[in-house]
Structure formats: C-alpha cells, structure tokens
Image (cartoon, helix red, strand yellow):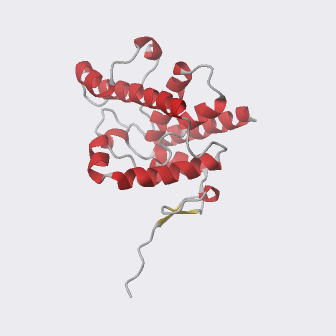
Amino acid sequence: MAPQNRAWQRMLSGRRLDLLDPTPVDIEIDDIAHGLAFVARWNGQTVGDFAYSVAEHSLLVEELFGRIAPKAPVKWRLAALLHDAPEYVIGDMISPVKASVGPGYDELDARLMAAIHIRFGLPATLPVTIKKQIKKADRISAWMEAIRIAGFAEAEANKFFGKPDKSLIADLDIRLRPPVEARRDYVQRHDLLLRQLG
C-alpha cells in the first residue's frame, strides 16, 4: 500500500493546518502575518533591497478600501486586510500561473478563506458588494506596485489594472522594508481592527 500524501502543514505556532479540510481552530494571526511577510508579490521581480510582501500589500489594500468605502463597518476593513490571507499557506501566484493551474487553485483558496473568515468572526462568504470594493482596492494597489516597483509603464498598468482615481492614492507610497516590520504592522493592524469590532 502506497503512503498517503501529506495534506497538512505545520505552522510555527504548532498548529497543523489541513489544506483539504481547514478548520478555524487551526488558524492563528501570527502564522498568517509571518507567512505573508515572507511571501513576495510579483514573484520577487521588483526593485529594491527587500521584496514587496503580501503583508505589505494587504496593509495597503485595507487602507485603500477604507478610502473607497469610508462608512463601511470595521468588519469589512478586517476582511480587506485578510483578503490574501490564504497565501500564507499557498503562496502568491501571479495571475498567469493561477490561470494555468485552473479551478483547483480557486477551490483551495476558497476553503482556506472561509476558515480564516470564520476564525475572525466574519461570514464565510463576503457580500458581493464588499468583495467588489475589496477587489477595486486590490487592483489599485496592483497598479501602484506595477508602476512604482515592478517596471510597468503607466499606460501598460492602466491596460491591465485600470486607471485609478489619483485622489485615492495621492499621499500613498509603496513601502519596501524588512519582513519583520511588515509582520509586526500586520498583526498590530489586525489586533486594532478586532478591538474596534468589540
């Protein structure tokens, strides 16, 4: 009898996360923040001495979401911060790779996201309006990253990500810094949003 393939990953917290059947009890914010802080966006093909991490990207998306939907309840800002949280386990695949992998990636991502949402008091599936607003913030962040650190011309970024409302990003910048700093700020922002949820 052939040995069964392992479908779980041990986290630094000691939790054992089953990728095929993730449960909220095995999800910890410190594991998420650590993983995301060490996962590079753009497959690491960015300028600078540090990779631009998914944790840093998530902080920016949460800020942009707050500007797009300033009256949204705090729980949706938390959802924006967590929008890429499954990548702490499955990594950040660029869109062309996701398209090549097919529907299996989306199914895995959805299972993990539902467990993460439940763990932090959010509905397993977000309302469509909120998902669209978070996606808009995500695309604006991608546009900023593309032209500021990933070598895209502005016209090319406009083609792939859409031209953003410049007033939303006028005072925002892309931060390239050590992973431990992004990890710390991600956890702190998460904790603040949870406290505001009461």
**Residue located 41% across and 14% down the image:** 165
- What x and y, as percent, mark residue 1? 39, 88
The residue closer to the viewer here, 128 or 33, is 128
Q: Position of residue 171 (x, y in %)?
A: 47, 15
Q: Residue at x 29, y 31 (%)?
A: 150
> From the viewer's perspective, is 129 left or right of 193?
left
Residue reaching furthest to the top = 167
Question: Residue 46, located in which quarter of the rendered image?
Answer: top left
Query: Looking at the image, which residue sits at the far front?
Result: 128
Q: Position of residue 28 (x, y in %)?
A: 61, 52
Tell me if I can see residue 60 in this picture. Answer: no
Q: Is residue 2 above or below residue 64?
A: below
Residue at left 59%, top 31%?
77
- Give the percent coordinates (x, y) of residue 105: 38, 53
Q: Can the viewer see residue 101 in this picture?
A: yes
In the image, residue 134 sits, relative to residue 26, either above or below, namely: above
Quarter residue 158 falls in? top left
